[in-house]
Image (spheres, rainbow, N blue to C red):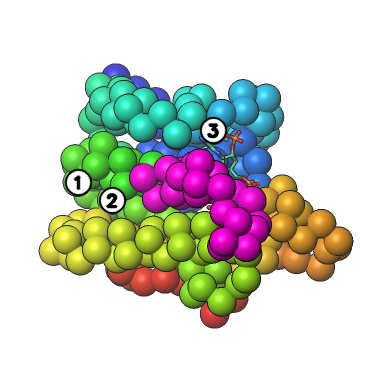
């Protein structure tokens, strides 16, 4: 079925967008903004309550959304999602690989191997699997857009942040490689580095911080619209919010 479409107005009118990690934080704000810009949003995360809150918010504003509860750690389920997107819509215009995990901040020498694997599974392997499962439907779009969320921690200068930082560095390489492989297609593939944003993840890393001093998720959403817009010409870039 290709019957579900976004609303008629806005920069993303009629576009179909998949947003991971849409139950709260940055992903919630991006999904809400995309719907306000006219996209039909497919929103994924594990927490059904957060997705339902998003659903209520989007529909109250006249937007269009489908909820797809999913644990991205179950990599095979990503293939199932890709197949159902193909069956239902035949194409995907926008992929936002936003879901991520901080893991436990700990000295390298004490890192729990299982925790290390969990962080990589979500931050790296799930995004590789999303690309693998969704590349074909993105190429069906006249202007496919893929956006992944990285971090300044990828530079590797933060003691105790090794698992998260190394996983984001791996994500950067993965996404830049995908960008090179798609340079001659209609796809535009980019990374966003948001800086400090007032979310649950940031509060876990810096519990003493006043969230009011940080970028709010809604403030960041416009940058995602820029990179999701069919008119976007940026490709293979790591775009830092505020630059
Ligand atoms: N906040 C910052 O300052 C900051 C800075 C740089 C980069 N980032 C990046 O921005 C992205 C969003 O982070 P955030 O700050 O918005 O964090 P957040 O509030 O903790 O949200 C994380 C999102 O990821 C989803 N998620 C986590 N584990 C999942 C799983 N196994 N399967 C499916 N979804 C899962 C969560 O949903 P469920 O728990 O419902 O599954 C949630 O929607 C992340 O990639 C993060 O690394 C954030």
Tag 2 and tag 1, C-beta contact below 8 Å: yes
Closer to the chain start, of discs 2 and 1, is 1
- The spot of residue 27 in percent (x, y) is 57, 46
Q: Residues within 10 Å of mark 1 (few under 14, many from 20)?
A: some
> Which residue is located at x 65 percent, y 58 percent?
106
State the image coordinates of residue 217 (x, y, percent, origin top left): 66, 55
> What residue occupies the far left of the structure in this picture?
184
Residue beneath the point at 45% across and 34% down: 72
Where disc 3 sits, the SS reads loop
- 3 vs 1, front mark: 3
Q: Earlier in the sequence, mark 3 or mark 2?
A: 3
Alpha carbon of mark 2 to alpha carbon of mark 1: how far?
Answer: 6 Å
C-alpha separation, residue under disc 3 versus residue under disc 2: 22 Å
Numbered tag placed on residue 202 in the rendering: none
Give the numbered dot on residue 139.
1
- Tell whether label 2 touches label 3 (CB within 8 Å): no
What range of the chain is rendered magenta? 100-125
Q: Residue furthest front?
A: 109
Query: In this picture, is 22 found above or below 200?
Result: above
């Amino acid at each position: 079925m290709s019957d579900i479409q976004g609303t008629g107005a806005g920069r993303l009118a009629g576009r179909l967008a998949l947003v991971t990690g849409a139950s709260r934080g940055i992903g919630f704000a991006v999904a809400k903004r995309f719907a306000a810009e006219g996209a039909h949003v497919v929103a994924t995360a594990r927490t059904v309550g957060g997705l339902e809150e998003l659903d209520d918010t989007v529909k109250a504003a006249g937007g269009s959304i489908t909820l797809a509860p999913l644990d991205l750690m179950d990599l095979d389920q990503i293939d199932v999602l890709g197949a159902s997107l193909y069956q239902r819509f035949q194409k995907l215009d926008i992929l936002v690989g936003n879901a991520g995990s901080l893991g436990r901040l700990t000295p390298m020498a004490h890192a729990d191997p299982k925790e290390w694997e969990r962080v990589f599974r979500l931050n790296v392997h799930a995004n590789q699997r999303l690309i693998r499962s969704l590349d074909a439907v993105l190429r069906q779009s006249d202007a496919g857009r893929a956006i992944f969320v990285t971090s300044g921690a990828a530079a590797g200068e933060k003691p105790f942040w090794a698992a998260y930082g190394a996983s984001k560095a791996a994500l950067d390489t993965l996404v830049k490689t995908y960008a090179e492989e798609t340079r001659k297609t209609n796809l535009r593939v980019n990374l966003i580095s948001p800086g400090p944003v007032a979310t649950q993840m940031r509060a876990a890393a810096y519990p003493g911080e006043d969230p009011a001093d940080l970028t709010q998720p809604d403030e960041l959403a416009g940058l995602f619209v820029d990179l999701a817009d069919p008119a976007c010409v940026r490709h293979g870039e790591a775009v830092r919010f505020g630059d």
